[in-house]
Amino acid sequence: MKPVKQRRSIRLPDYDYAQDGAYYVTICTHERRCIFGDVINTEMILNTLGCIADEEWRQSEALRPYVELDAYVIMPNHIHGVVVINWGYESNRTQHAASLQTPKGATRNNVQPQSLSAIIRAFKAATTRRINAVLQTPGMPLWQGRFYEHIIRNEQSLNKIRAYIFSNPAQWEQDSQYPENKAD
């Protein structure tokens, strides 16, 4: 029997990813398949599947009053975005806001409820369900198992990340996710 390879976590040990903070994330499609549309004349044009990803990304904020979405872009085979977790949200954003509390404890697969990982997991699950229904491909993987994250520590870093996100379509052919630039 082949030994099971243990993945090393890329998350900071002892960091609470459910606390207030801004996080830059990159989420790649399974096998980096280009399924969300095309970059045409430096502009990302979403297809039907890209529109589903966009709707579900926006739902991340609509369903969770402690989540604020900042700059983001959906590219042909990945998404870049800034996710802000803010437990001091205004109570009038949703009617059930008062029932939420800062999360404690861990759940299935050590993903803390209402943490960045839980938010991304829910986004991936909803998007996968909807896209597999459209394509009639139940069970087909849509996303890579992991995602990249960076804790944004100051306004200067946030502004650089925003500029990178907004310029990403114009830089598509130089992007490391561009299919011809992939290292095999």
Image: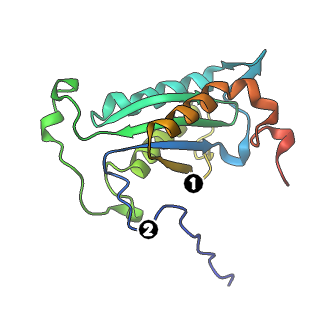
Residue 156 percent across, percent down from the top left: 50, 36
Kindly identify the residue that appears in the image at 52 percent across and 49 percent down. 150
Residue at coordinates 77% horizontally, 17% vertically from top-left? 40
What is the secondary structure assignment of the residue under circle 1? Answer: loop
Contact, CB < 8 Å: mark 1 with mark 2?
no
Instruction: Report whether 75 appears left or right of 109.
Output: right
Looking at the rendered structure, which numbered label has been put on residue 17? none
**Mark 1 lies on residue:** 146
**Residue identified by numbered label 2:** 13
Applied colour scheme: rainbow
Q: Tell me the amino acid under the disc marked 2.
A: Pro
Q: Determine the image quadrant of residue 69.
A: top left
**Residue 31 place in picture, x, y as percent:** 72, 48
Give neighbour class at mark 1: few <14, some 14-19, many 20+ (Cα, 10 Å). some
Q: Is residue 41 left or right of residue 78?
A: right
User: Residue 116: percent from the left, percent from the top?
Assistant: 41, 48
Q: In the rendered picture of this protein, how many numbered marks are placed on residues?
A: 2
- Along the line of sight, which residue is nearer the eye, 35 or 148? 148
**Where does the C terminus fall, quadrant-wise?**
bottom right
Mark 1: which amino acid? Arg
Q: Outermost residue toward the front?
A: 156
Q: What residue is drawn where x is 53% and y is 66%?
A: 9
146 horizontally vs 17: left or right: right
How far is mark 1 from mark 2, CA to CA? 16 Å
Q: Earlier in the sequence, mark 1 or mark 2?
A: 2
Mark in front: 1 vs 2: 2
Question: Of all residues shown, which one is farthest toward the top?
Answer: 41
Note whether 56 is above or below 1 in the view shown: above
